[in-house]
Every structure is written in structure tokens, then in C-alpha cells.
Amino acid sequence: MRVEDCFLVGRILKPHHLHGECKAYFDVDDIEDYKEMESVYLLQGKKLTPFFIEKIRVISPNQAIVQFKNILDRTTAESLPGSEMYLPLDQLDELEPHQFYYHEVKDFTIVDKNLGELGRIVRVDEHPSQVLIVMNWKNREVLIPIAGDIVGNVDREAKTLQTNLPEGLLEIYISPSALAADEEE
């Protein structure tokens, strides 16, 4: 199994008590969807290693206590903190045409309803107050909020993401003189 064929679920934080349990952070929308997992891949060095799960006990919206099979003491569990947890991509749920997973749109092209093709998606940043698409537009980093009607359908085959950017959003990222020079071209 390769990292490219998986998606990040979370990471091991620290050992929990004496019997090999680990406290884990889950970077997911609903941790309850993952509490029945039977196994997970841990990234150790550059290699994914399968770990089978005995039980998961949810303790907060993004944290759980995980008991792995064959990890029976604290000493063994102390080798796991910092390990990222992965699952195969084929375990992701199918989405509606307007929905997408943040990791899958990296390198997609933004096509705006009014402005046409704009630029390439560099990444998606999740902040506490909102999620932002980071796009490369004319060698500038532009942040596009994933909110309301701004982001539309995704075309996985064409590798495009439709948007309806608010008027003036792009102009925020460039000086008036640079905008005038772009219009002259």
C-alpha cells in the first residue's frame, strides 16, 4: 500500500495508561463514522504498516482512545506517537457532483462562471472559522472561501472546479497598476 493510494484519517498523539492504548486525533468530519474501523495503516518512516484495531473509544469530537491488537503495554505504545493514520482511498464514500474531498482537488483548475479559467488549486486549508481553496492565479496566491454559492460542481474527469467568485475578489490580490497592465495584454 502506498501513501498516494490512501487518505489521512489522523495521527497518534500519545500512549494512554499502561495497557498499550493510544490517544489519537481524527481529522475527519464525524469521528463516529470511524469508531468501528477494523484496521488502519500507520506511516512509520516512509512505509505504511497495517495495524489491526481491538477497539476505539471516542472521547471528544476529534479524539479517541485506540487499542491496537498486539500492542499490550505502554512501552510498545510509546513508539507510535506522531504516526499518521491512513485508510485506502476506496473506503471513501461516493459524493454528489457538487461535493468533493479536499485532497482530491489539488492541481484541479478553477473555472469561474463569469471569468473563465483562472488557475490551479495548490491546496485546501482548513481554518477554525472557514475552509479556503488556495489557488495560483497569475503567479499570485489567491484564497477562495468554500462558502455559500462560491464553489460549484467538480468535474473529476476534466479536473476542474467551477466557481462563482464574488465581484472584486481577485482584485484584492493585485495592485491597481498590475491590474491595468494585465488588461492591456
Image (cartoon, rainbow, N blue to C red):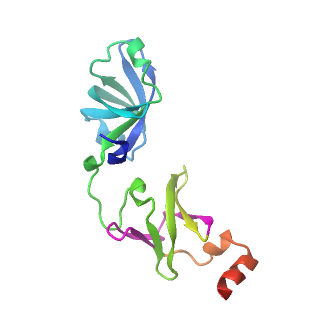
Residue 144 horizontal side relative to residue 183, left or right:
left
Residue 23 on image: x %, y %: 42, 26
Q: Residue at x 47, y 68 (%)?
A: 148
Residue 142 shows up from this direction: yes
Residue 49 on image: x %, y %: 32, 30
Above-or-below relation of 48 to 78:
below
Residue 95 horizontal side relative to residue 150, left or right:
left
Residue 169 on image: x %, y %: 61, 72
Q: Residue at x 36, y 12 (%)?
A: 73
Above-or-below relation of 121 to 67:
below
Q: Residue at x 69, y 79 (%)?
A: 179
Give whichever of 57, 142 is nearer the camera. 142
Residue 60 on image: x %, y %: 42, 34
Stretch in magenta: 139-163
Quarter of the picture containing the C terminus is bottom right
Quarter of the picture containing the N terminus is top left
Q: Residue at x 69, y 72 (%)?
A: 174
